Image: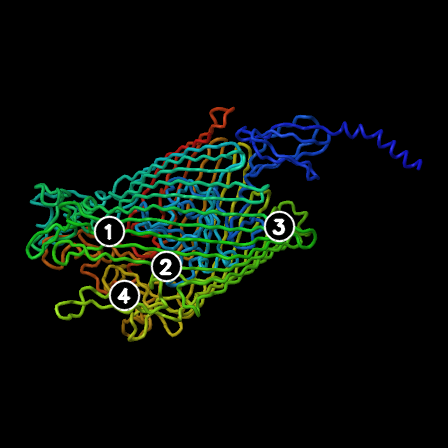
């Protein structure tokens, strides 16, 4: 009893001391970069669950003991710990760039770079290309190992070809799946739109996540066999309002021309080689000096303006809104693209942060003037001694054009083709999604997610000729006619793509051997519909007349169930396993479902005890992965109902006569009821590393990929409804290697130097085609039907040309129609043709970033080793008689300038079809391109204000080092005929943050 009384007495004596040690701490939390208050910042007493958040003005008040530690934190900023020694503590939190960059978006969730088990690369603002950027694909060109991005020329809306690890199919779609804010895009573009990434504003993009191997892509199942590119756009802020205005002006010039005769050279060539045709030089005795290539091209310009606002409405609703406008005048005259974009991101949280609602909405409107691309070919063939405009005025709106009693003679006036045709291709597109993420009360480890989305577009195409257009002129029954009384072509289209994802996610951290478990399971629904009407015309009766409008409707439905589990053991071992079941409406009910599992293991070696004293290793991770993905997109070659017997309207010019009535017939479509999934299995091994306090980092990957049940358009047996149709045939095997490296040798407050490089090797061989040895795979070279050079064959690489090996004389000149007898049988036949791959095995890119105080410099280069380009211009314009028409038609045409010292150094007569199938026309396509350089200066004119300015200048496509003798060695399909030149572009820009 006495002891108890003594303890109570002692407690009463000490109580005032404890009470006096408790104090009220107040203060303000601000953003160190802008000096603005941070509403919603967290302040927690270390070692306890006691904490508060700041109010709208960044103020807080908390009861804490003297000597205790307060932890101040805010999303995206570095946390700070402060010991309580006074009643007032003001804290400024700094940006935590590494924290933001560490998050990698993957299928149906996120991970971190250090915890990723697959071959995944994150590209953020500092990694992306700078300068003349008008479409999203230009931001990642050459920046990711194994990702090849090739556009189809200098058109403002040039189509793009993106391949991750070379693609996996023969005739099915080989493009990667593109996901924008959780919305997987259709592989079909809106009518008239060649580049799907034209329809997103690059200024809105936060990051790209590139998923390369099957263990990371299999969660997307049927659409992920060629990799996945996930685009995440910028979001709102929980801090003070922020505004940004960016503007740049770009000017482009013609970087190169195809080497054809100029006027003086052409006169010399014709007079000395074909004097009988000298009378066709010039007009009425006057020799004109017309450079038709320069006449159709111009100095291009682009103006980009973007305004962005970020805020935290009512201290509860992070919001970001942006508006952008791009005016792009292409380097080819009359090419124009105007793009208007608007985006909205809202992400409020409810019920004590248990429910998060994320709404993304993007509106895009494009207005495009698409010129007549035939003008490029005409400019290469047109007589350079003729005038652009008719000295007598003429009948073609002032343009000069040769005619006779049959109509147009010779090449059409290239400039007239551009100026006298209008083709308007306009599209309005809306991409929107709403995600509800609910952390279940009382069971916070379990989260329910529902994501709905829509991709809706309306497109119109209208094409018509202006009065007196050269291209509209014809002679019918002796009567000259201008067929411009009605539109030449029209189309209206509506696309509706719907998405629904619903899944549960359980994530929990544990103590002990199992550190973390993250499990997901759910359902995905996608439906793609396209409907439209085309308005074709005909000139069969002389005058242009409208034909019966053609209505079309397509629908593709995909439904899936998926599950994934991530397990972390001993802080060192990471396991990932996933499975997806996909159903596609392209297959019959018996073959509709495909099942695609995947598994991966990662070992964080830097967490092991045997490396704990190795201070120079920040991260060292070994990855192993395997996965199976599927392919079903064969809509390009065979449409949307390839397994069903259907009938189409027959040829309207063919029918049966019943009395006085002509009845057209229906024709049966080819079909294959046994079509099923193409399957791709990939094994991947990789290493991620980060050494010397982040000064040296990178990754290395190797992979083997096997594709079975190939969906290929192959020859059919006699009596089939079509000569070729899609079947499941054969297998391919791909092998590859990728490496990416970042080196930061100098990192100081005033000076930073960074170097980056990536390289990739890939080759794909066709190992089996069932009972087929080889078949033609296109590759037209301007010689008409049947003269193609593309070939697919067992035992050869995918995407090859099939050509004879040219024989040369002692002086190194080609001997026409002389080829190597490969099999020695004394006869030159198809058996002597060789398979020559035209895709490069090696691609690479490298760059540098230098910063000195407020001044910075960036340079990026990229290229390829190997690959071939077939120069169809050399075939069709590189012989002497190309200048002289085969019939007496009263005109002459230009050719390649191979004339030297009175002799034409090409063939004299038109090459035979066999000569056209010679490797004489092949050139090495290796190149190194200086893609862009940028110099910028950052300044804050008012130290006590948050106004920040950045001024920069850049140059793109400065030079190309190559042995290729054509226009440009970067050619995705390997054949150059009349290419749209890529411009050299100079940019001056301004960014303002306030």
Mark 2 and mark 3: span between their CA atoms? 39 Å
Q: Say which residue label 2 marks.
A: 555
> Residue 596's spot in the image, x, y percent?
50, 63
Instruction: Say which mark, if any, is on residue 648.
Output: 4
Mark 4 or mark 3: which comes first in sequence?
Answer: 3
Say if mark 4 contacts mark 3, CB within 8 Å. no
Mark 1 or mark 2: which comes first in sequence?
Answer: 1
Q: Residues within 10 Å of mark 2 (few under 14, many from 20)?
A: some
Judge whether 243 appears above or below 659 on screen. Answer: above
The image quarter in which residue 930 lies: top left
> Residue 579's spot in the image, x, y percent?
53, 61
Mark 1 or mark 4: which comes first in sequence?
Answer: 1
Element marked by disc 2: strand
Tell me the mark number nearer the camera, choosing from 1 and 2: 2
Q: Residues within 10 Å of mark 4 (few under 14, many from 20)?
A: few
Q: Residues within 10 Å of mark 1 (few under 14, many from 20)?
A: some
Question: Quadrant location of the N terminus?
Answer: top right
Mark 3 and mark 1: span between their CA atoms? 55 Å
The image quarter in which residue 477 lies: bottom left
Q: Say which residue label 3 marks.
A: 445
Element marked by disc 1: strand
Say if mark 4 contacts mark 2, CB within 8 Å. no
State left or right for residue 565 relative to residue 946. Answer: right
Q: Say which residue label 1 marks.
A: 490
Mark 1 and mark 2: span between their CA atoms? 22 Å
Mark 2 or mark 3: which comes first in sequence?
Answer: 3
């Amino acid at each position: 009893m006495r002891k108890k009384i003594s303890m109570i007495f002692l407690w009463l004596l000490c109580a005032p001391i404890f009470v006096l040690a408790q104090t009220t701490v107040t203060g303000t939390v601000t953003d160190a970069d802008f000096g603005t208050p941070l509403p919603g910042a967290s302040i927690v007493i270390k070692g306890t669950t006691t904490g508060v958040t700041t109010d709208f003005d960044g103020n807080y008040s908390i009861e804490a003991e003297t000597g205790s530690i307060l932890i101040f934190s805010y999303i995206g900023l570095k946390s700070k710990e402060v010991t309580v020694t006074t009643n007032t503590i003001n804290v400024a939190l700094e940006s935590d760039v590494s924290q933001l960059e560490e998050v990698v978006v993957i299928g149906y969730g996120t991970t971190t770079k250090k915890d990723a088990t697959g071959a995944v690369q994150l590209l953020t603002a500092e990694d992306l290309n700078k300068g003349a950027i008008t479409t999203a694909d230009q931001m990642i060109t050459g920046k990711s190992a194994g990702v090849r991005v090739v556009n189809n020329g200098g058109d403002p809306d040039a189509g793009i070809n993106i391949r991750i690890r070379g693609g996996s199919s023969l005739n099915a779609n080989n493009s990667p799946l593109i996901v924008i804010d959780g919305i997987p895009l259709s592989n079909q573009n809106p009518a008239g739109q060649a580049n799907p990434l034209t329809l997103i504003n690059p200024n809105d993009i936060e990051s790209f996540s590139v998923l390369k191997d099957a263990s990371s892509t299999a969660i997307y199942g049927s659409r992920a066999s060629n990799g996945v590119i996930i685009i995440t756009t910028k979001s709102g802020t929980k801090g003070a309002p922020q505004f940004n205005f960016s503007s740049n002006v770009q000017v482009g010039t013609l970087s190169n021309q195809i080497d054809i005769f100029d006027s003086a050279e052409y006169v010399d060539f014709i007079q000395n080689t074909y004097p009988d045709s000298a009378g066709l030089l010039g007009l009425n005795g006057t020799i004109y000096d017309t450079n038709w290539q320069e006449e159709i091209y111009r100095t291009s310009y682009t103006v980009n303006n973007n305004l962005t606002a970020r805020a935290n409405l009512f201290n509860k609703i992070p919001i970001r809104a942006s508006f952008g406008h791009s005016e792009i005048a292409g380097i080819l005259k009359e090419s124009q693209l105007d793009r208007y974009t608007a985006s909205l991101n809202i992400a409020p949280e409810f019920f004590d942060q248990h429910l998060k609602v994320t709404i993304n909405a993007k509106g895009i409107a494009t207005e495009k003037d698409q010129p007549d691309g035939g003008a490029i070919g005409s400019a290469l063939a047109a007589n350079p001694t003729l005038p652009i405009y008719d000295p007598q005025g003429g009948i073609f709106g002032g343009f000069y054009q040769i005619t006779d009693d049959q109509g147009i003679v010779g090449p059409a006036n290239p400039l007239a083709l551009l100026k006298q045709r209008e083709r308007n291709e306009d599209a309005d597109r809306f991409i929107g999604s709403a995600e509800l993420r609910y952390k279940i009360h009382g069971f916070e480890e379990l989260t329910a997610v529902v994501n709905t989305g829509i991709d809706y577009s309306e497109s119109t195409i209208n094409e018509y000729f202006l009065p007196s257009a050269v291209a509209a002129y014809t002679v019918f029954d002796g009567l000259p006619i201008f067929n411009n009384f009605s539109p030449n072509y029209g189309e209206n289209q509506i696309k509706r793509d719907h998405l629904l994802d619903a899944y549960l996610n359980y994530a929990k951290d544990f103590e002990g051997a199992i550190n973390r478990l993250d499990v997901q399971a759910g359902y995905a629904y996608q439906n793609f519909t396209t409907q439209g009407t085309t308005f074709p015309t005909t000139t069969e009766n002389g005058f242009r007349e409208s034909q019966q409008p053609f209505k079309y409707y397509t629908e593709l439905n995909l439904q899936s169930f998926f599950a994934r589990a991530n397990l972390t053991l001993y802080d060192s071992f990471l396991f990932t396993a996933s499975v997806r079941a996909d159903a596609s409406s392209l297959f019959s009910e018996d073959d509709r479902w495909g099942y695609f599992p995947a598994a991966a293991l990662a070992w964080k070696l830097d967490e092991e005890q045997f490396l704990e004293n190795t201070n120079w290793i920040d991260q060292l991770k070994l990855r192993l992965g395997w996965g199976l993905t599927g392919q079903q997109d064969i809509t390009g070659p065979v449409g949307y109902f390839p397994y069903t017997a259907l009938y189409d309207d027959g040829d309207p010019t063919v029918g049966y006569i019943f009395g006085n009535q002509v009845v057209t017939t229906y024709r049966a479509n080819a079909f294959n009821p046994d079509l099923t999934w193409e399957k791709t299995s990939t094994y991947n091994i990789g290493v991620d590393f980060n050494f010397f306090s982040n000064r040296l980092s990178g990754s290395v990957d190797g992979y083997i990929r096997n594709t079975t049940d190939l969906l290929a358009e192959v020859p059919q047996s006699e009596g089939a409804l079509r000569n070729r149709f899609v079947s499941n045939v054969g297998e391919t095997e791909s092998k590859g290697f990728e490496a990416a490296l970042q080196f930061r040798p100098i990192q100081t407050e005033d000076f930073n130097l960074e170097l980056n490089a990536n390289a990739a090797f890939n080759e794909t061989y066709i190992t089996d085609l069932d009972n087929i040895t080889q078949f033609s795979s296109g590759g037209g070279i301007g010689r008409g039907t049947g003269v193609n050079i593309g070939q697919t064959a067992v035992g050869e690489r995918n995407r090859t040309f099939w050509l004879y090996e040219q024989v040369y004389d002692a002086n190194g000149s080609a001997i026409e129609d002389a080829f190597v007898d490969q099999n020695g049988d004394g006869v030159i036949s198809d058996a002597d043709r060789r398979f020559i791959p035209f895709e490069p095995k090696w691609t690479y890119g490298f760059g540098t970033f230098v910063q000195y105080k407020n001044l910075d410099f960036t340079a990026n280069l990229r290229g390829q080793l190997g690959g071939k380009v077939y120069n169809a211009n050399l075939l069709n314009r590189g012989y002497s008689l190309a200048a002289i028409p085969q019939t007496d038609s009263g005109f002459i045409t230009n050719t390649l300038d191979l004339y030297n010292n009175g002799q034409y150094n090409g063939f004299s007569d038109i090459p035979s079809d066999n000569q056209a199938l010679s490797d004489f026309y092949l050139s090495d396509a290796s190149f190194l391109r200086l893609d862009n350089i940028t110099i910028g200066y950052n300044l804050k004119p008012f130290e006590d204000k948050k106004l920040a300015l950045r001024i920069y200048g850049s140059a793109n496509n400065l030079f190309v080092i190559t042995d290729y003798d054509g226009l440009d060695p970067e050619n995705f399909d390997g054949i150059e005929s009349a290419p749209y030149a890529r411009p050299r572009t100079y940019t001056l820009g301004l960014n303002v943050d306030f």
